Image (cartoon, rainbow, N blue to C red):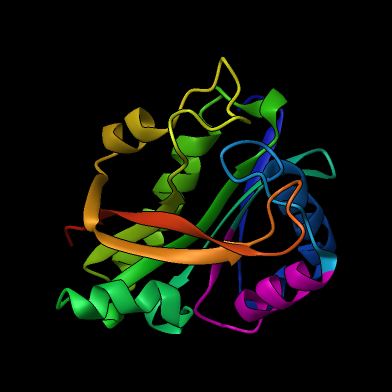
Amino acid sequence: MTGLTLTTRRGPAIAPHLEALAGLRIRVFRDFPYLYDGDPAYEAAYLGRYAENPASLFVLAFDGEALVGAATGQPLADEVAEFRAPFAAAGIDPATVFYYGESLLLPEYRGRGIGKAFMAEREAHARDNGFALAAFCAVERPEEHPRKPADYRPLHGFWASRGYRRRGELATTFAWKDLGEAEESDKPMVFWLKELTP
């Protein structure tokens, strides 16, 4: 992480960085497997939910003044119904879960340990605030998806190395517009969980 600065913000303190964070989300999520056709109006609404929540966490990576990476999280109980419902159906109280919204990092900054730092900061925050579980969900695309790059490497190995386990029974769908789509469509998402020790 030489030359980079990592900092955290809570809730409304993210306000000065919202525009840069929206741009980062649109840029990073255009790539496979998300293929997100970015929408500034959606970004404003989505990030607004986090910015208005004093219990949310933002971990920001800067190269000088430029925002090059970010990771977010907030209590699952404050998330949308699509993310809460699978836990409630499985008998897991959403109030016990800290949910990771996303991890974003520009390609040229990957492989420097920033992803590990993002995980560590959010885990420490969740643990310090009494959450029993940390969770995130990831889109699952068909193995033969036409937009899958030949050199694509999923992050499953990295997540597993950090102690997260795929929980296939905890699945949901979430809608966004893929590149090339005329309108939004539901995408299959599966959750990964880690138990947090005090």
Whole-percent x, y for residue 197 in the image: 16, 58
Query: Is residue 13 left or right of 76 when viewed as pictured?
Result: right
Q: Where are the magenta residues, as a range?
A: 41-58
Is most of the magenta stretch helix, strand or loop?
A: helix
Please say whether residue 129 is visible from this viewpoint.
yes
Query: Is residue 134 left or right of 103 when viewed as pictured?
Result: left
Residue at 26% x, 47% y: name it: 166
Image quadrant where residue 110 sits: top right
Image quadrant where residue 2 sits: top right
**Quadrant holding the C terminus:** bottom left
Residue at 28% x, 36% y: name it: 160
Task: Say if the magenta span includes residue 9.
Answer: no
**Quadrant holding the N terminus:** top right
Residue at 75% x, 57% y: name it: 21
Please say whether residue 195 is visible from this viewpoint.
no
Whole-percent x, y for residue 35 in the image: 66, 44
Residue at 61% x, 75% y: name it: 50
Whole-percent x, y for residue 5 in the image: 68, 40
Up/down of 19 relative to 77, above or below: above
Whole-percent x, y for residue 121 in the image: 45, 52
